[in-house]
Image (cartoon, grey):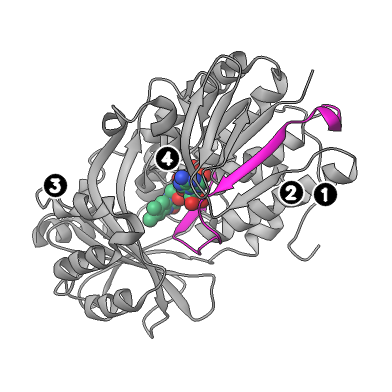
Amino acid sequence: MAPLSILIVGCGIGGPTLASFLLLSSHDSQQRPRITILERSTTHARGQNIDVRGAGVTVIRKLRLENAIRSATTGEEGTKFVDADNRVWAAIPADKSGRVQTGTSDIEILRGRLADLLYRRSKDVSQELEDEGGEGIEYIFGDSLEGLEQDSEKVHVRFAKNGERRTFDLVVGADGLQSPTRRLGFGQNGDHERVKQLGMYGGFFSMPKGSTDSDWRRWFHAPGRRGIMVRPSEVNGMSTVFMSIINEKDKRFAEVAVGGHQGVDSQKALLREYFWDAGWESRRIIKEMEAADDFYYAMVAQVKMDKWSNGRVVLLGDAGYCASPISGMGTTLAMVGAYNLAGALTRFPSDHTAAFAEYEEKMRPVVERAQKLAPGAPYVLAPETAWGIWVLHAFCLMINYSRIGLLLAMIWGPPANAVPVEDYGFKQLAEWSPQT
Ligand SMILES: Cc1cc2nc3c(=O)[nH]c(=O)nc-3n(C[C@H](O)[C@H](O)[C@H](O)COP(=O)(O)OP(=O)(O)OC[C@H]3O[C@@H](n4cnc5c(N)ncnc54)[C@H](O)[C@@H]3O)c2cc1C
């Protein structure tokens, strides 16, 4: 039997994780899949602060990447709720034991940094396989998927850059919330219904560290459901910012999201309009946003689908089941999803239908739990009025001085510790660090 040829679209979190595990199967090295990874970007931009939790940590341990990842974290100590005078109403520390999932996890890292480590790990696994006589991963950066058609035997794709046509046995869409693979493989019509918008929009960027910035995340709320978070960065002398707003009335928030990177000027202008007079350090932050070259605008949404595969095309991570940044589970879902998809394809190498069904069966309950947001979310953490903000601060103050915070985190914190990680007999690796 010829080994499977698999195109993975997206080299973010899920894509390289899947590739590594597929190559770590116990099958003979000649029989392991032939993998191509197609990534639109040419580099891994630093990106937003994300966290790896519970089962996600188990997956990075299986890749023997834990030390490398822990030494690349942002070191965030916890979250401080601050008012316009920078007075701290509550300081909720990270749970560094990883046992209780509070707002700050014990592994906080920039998304691009994590993606880069996972990519380099996959390259390393690929090289080892080549040394054993197998076929390593083919990486294509700076190109994207433009066309996709399938028949009962193969998937035929077209790349955007030079219109190159290629054929694969399977295609995995690990290309994020706006997944082109989802639209091409499941139909453009209906994609609007699959992506459930939460009415929240955000701008993310990094800026030089100011005198008030520290290892704590500071979270400022302004009336009109506006919020600004300033967080530590792994990069020396820098902080990161996430500005968010819930606004379902002003249609421009949705309109500017469509332009992607081409729409940066209009995205920045809109955030300036809403945040310049927000108070606190908003003017400094807006000035930094205007100068930022890594600005990124996103709508906050969840992806909900009845099925994550269609024939020979399957979705992974945000592309198929984005839980939104509010859930704190996106990274963990992408990593655990990649692990389970690799496990299923290893168990059923000649029956993709059975493999996709097993993957779905394992992931569906986990995803449903992750997508269930805490009561009142996202509104409860983005009050409309000054009075609402006062109530939020008073509530945070109260939980800060009682044990109730931990209890609430146990009930409503991200359910990352409850995700089972089965053993698929993948090859054991030696601990890896970027220097080795
Ligand atoms: C502001 C913000 C804060 C967040 N905070 C957290 C958090 O605290 N905890 C958490 O768990 N999650 C968080 N997330 C979510 C987390 O970033 C995602 O859930 C996670 O990155 C999903 O991984 P993925 O591999 O599915 O997709 P991604 O990491 O988005 O990777 C998709 C990849 O596909 C590439 N791509 C896209 N289109 C194409 C194309 N046409 N052709 C080729 N390649 C393509 C992209 O360039 C990208 O590299 C946050 C997200 C945002 C936006």
Kindly report which numbered mark, 3 or 2, lies closer to the viewer in this rendering. 3
Q: Is residue 343 above or below residue 221?
A: above
Can see residue 110?
no
Task: State the residue lying farthest toward the bottom.
Answer: 211
For the C terminus, the image quarter is bottom right
Q: Which residue is mark 4?
A: 179
Kindly report which numbered mark, 2 or 4, lies closer to the viewer in this rendering. 4
Distance between the alpha carbons at the discs numbered 4 and 1: 34 Å
Q: Which residue is mark 2?
A: 64
**Does mark 1 have its CB less than 8 Å from ligand 1?**
no
Instruction: State yes or no: discs 1 and 2 in contact (Cβ < 8 Å).
Output: yes
Q: Which residue is mark 1?
A: 430
Q: Is residue 41 above or below residue 316?
A: below
Distance between the alpha carbons at the discs numbered 2 and 4: 29 Å
Distance between the alpha carbons at the discs numbered 4 and 3: 23 Å
Please tell me which of labels 4 and 1 falls first in the chain: 4
Q: Is residue 129 above or below residue 394?
A: above
Image: magenta residue range: 27-53
> Depth check: 434 or 179 in front?
179
Q: Amino acid at mark 4?
A: Ser
Q: Amino acid at mark 3?
A: Glu
Q: Is residue 322 left or right of residue 170?
A: left
**Does mark 4 have its CB less than 8 Å from ligand 1?**
yes
Does 39 lie within the magenta span?
A: yes
Q: Amino acid at mark 1?
A: Ala
Mark carried by residue 248: 3
Relative image position of residue 414 (x, y in whole percent):
43, 41
